[in-house]
Amino acid sequence: MAASAPVVPALPGARSASPAMIWSALAIVYVVWGSTYLAIRIVVEAQIPPMLGMASRFLAAALLLATFLALRSGAGRLKVTRRELLGSGVVGLLLLAFGNGAVAIAEQTVPSGLAALLVAAVPLWLMLLRVGGGERPRVLTWIGVLIGFAGAALLSISGGDTSAKPLSVAILVLGTISWAVGSRFSPRLGLPKDPLVATTYEMAIGGTAMVLIGVLRGEPARLHLGAVDTKGWFALAYLVVFGSLLAYTAYSYLLANAPISLIGTYAYVNPAVAVLLGWLILSEHVTTTILLGGAVVVLGVALVVTAERRPAVATTSSAAPAKGAGAPPSE
């Protein structure tokens, strides 16, 4: 689960672009999505309630994106059908309100690096959903899943060596499951064909749901704008501009121009970026257990990626496009 990216349908068109552009976009996804875990941690440490903070992030991004689309192409571009609106709403709830929201709530006690490592298990949940749908993965895929879950279990019990609370870890795991479910079924929900429009509605609906959840959690009573320091506001602005706009644009470009097996490498590069930034900037305590568990998760995901990308070698350039931005290479 990238902590900041909504699921959108792949852009139409041929997958042809310069290697420099592809790798530039991929670098943005690697670094920015990996850094959002750090930014979320800074936001919640600045006494911004998690659900209201993330709600303001996605609502602001949705407003900016909608304004841009309306000014560039006219307000008619934002018109969607009832089914498209409903599909966007479901994705917004599963990925943003429940998925990203769980990350924000958990990071009140879970270090950003550990959170990213746990989220790296999303491709493994996706594989189990595929099995539930009647698919029969390869033996190597199963090996990767078992190794990945062993790593996730190791990370889950590492809370005794950090400030992480077991309940926070459990909330985070539930969030990854929600993200996986949304990623798996988003292609069947009839999302708007225009990915920018789909993202606008996903963020608007997901952000609105976060406001409601925040109110139910009593967050407005804990929000004191005058107590929020400059770092907190800067981190929130970073999430809006870079996490919800720049990285998404780069990802949309990749979906239209790069193979999904390459795009999906973000699933195991983001955690490395998050752990490094958390250690460098927030002095987060990185234990041997966390490093070992993270390495095991990455190994498991890498095996799943290796197993699932093999059929793509035999496909032609006219193969069907990737299913969605939230889907890892196994999708």
Image (cartoon, rainbow, N blue to C red):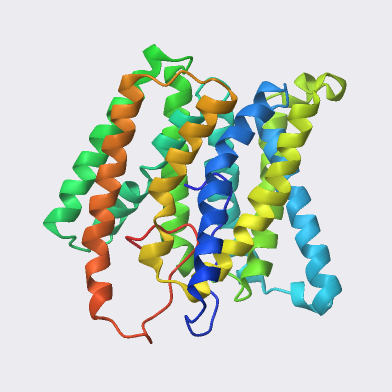
Residue at left 23%, top 33%?
A: 150
State whether residue 161 is above or below residue 90: above
Please state if 174 lies on the left or on the right of 240 as rendered.
left
State whether residue 239 is above or below residue 11: above
- Residue 205 visible within the image: no
Dividing the picture into quarters, in which one does residue 318 lie? Answer: bottom left
Residue at left 25%, top 75%?
A: 313
User: Residue lying farthest left?
Assistant: 139
Please state if 36 lies on the left or on the right of 58 as rendered.
left
Q: Nearer the viewer, residue 143 or 217?
A: 143
Q: Nearer the viewer, residue 239 or 272?
A: 272
Q: Quarter of the image containing the C terminus? A: bottom left
- Residue 230 visible within the image: yes
Q: Position of residue 155 (x, y in %)?
A: 34, 27
Q: Position of residue 158 (x, y in %)?
A: 35, 19
Q: Nearer the viewer, residue 308 or 56?
A: 308
Q: Nearer the viewer, residue 329 or 98?
A: 329
Residue at left 78%, top 33%?
A: 233
Dividing the picture into quarters, in which one does residue 271 lie? Answer: top left
Please state if 107 lies on the left or on the right of 187 as rendered.
right
Dividing the picture into quarters, in which one does residue 43 lie? Answer: top right
State whether residue 268 is above or below residue 315: above
Q: How many marks?
A: 0
